[in-house]
Image (tube, rainbow, N blue to C red):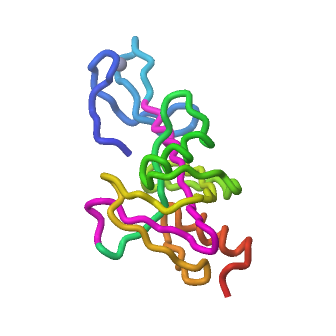
Amino acid sequence: MTDFKYCPLCASSLAVQERDGKHRLACTNAACEYVHWDNPTPVVAAIVTQGPHVLLARARGWAADRFFLIAGFLERGEHPDDAVLREVREELGVSGHIVEFVGYYNFALRNQILFVFQVEITSDPVLGEEIVEVKRLLPADVVPWERGTGPAVRDWLERHRMRP
Ligand SMILES: [Zn+2]
């Protein structure tokens, strides 16, 4: 769940307690109402396409064979549509447009909710600090991975019948 032990409001210790039939980490001070709800964090991710190709990216520090989608957190007040285009611009150095919203996906392992889009870019990526390598694949050659954004890639490929 989480590893913090003290209430951020009153510094009393936290303990697992029942709230509305669920077990929540909550403050043990009866005068304090703090509950750690542990709500998921929204994340936007892009299946980046350029003409017939799907572009997968490898970030700095990742193993040489680890290529994934472009993804990132939202800024306060930012619409997910704007956030995904900003992430593509920041990480690939090019602007793009949303072709479709692929779907919402739970990434329970990281307590995230993923908003996945297909984003078409119109010129070649200009790699910066974060992304060190980009791989271009035909959709039929993309093998969806198990976790995180993988199920979104699988659904997108299947919906468009891009896998044999
Ligand atoms: Zn407290």
Residue positioned most to the top:
31
Relative to 133, is 21 on the left or the right? right
Residue at image location 35% in from the left, 23% down from the top = 28
Q: Residue at x 62, y 43 (%)?
A: 81
Q: Position of residue 99 (x, y in %)?
A: 69, 56
Percent x, y for residue 161?
Answer: 73, 78
* Point 44% across, 55% down: residue: 92
Residue 38 falls inside the magenta stretch: yes
Question: Front-most of 105 and 163?
Answer: 163
> What main secondary structure does the magenta stretch of the protein show?
strand
Residue 46 located within the stretch drawn in magenta: yes
Image coords of residue 29 (percent x, y): 35, 18
Left/right of residue 42 with respect to residue 1 in the rendered view: right
Vertical arrangement, residue 73 with respect to residue 106, above or below: above
Q: Is residue 13 above or below residue 3?
A: above
Viewer-nearest residue: 128 or 108: 128
Indicate which quadrant contains ligand 1. Answer: top left
Report whether 78 appears left or right of 109: right
Q: Is residue 54 left or right of residue 67?
A: right
| Quadrant of the drawing holding the N terminus | top left
Q: Which residues are magenta?
A: 36-63
Image quarter where the C terminus lies is bottom right
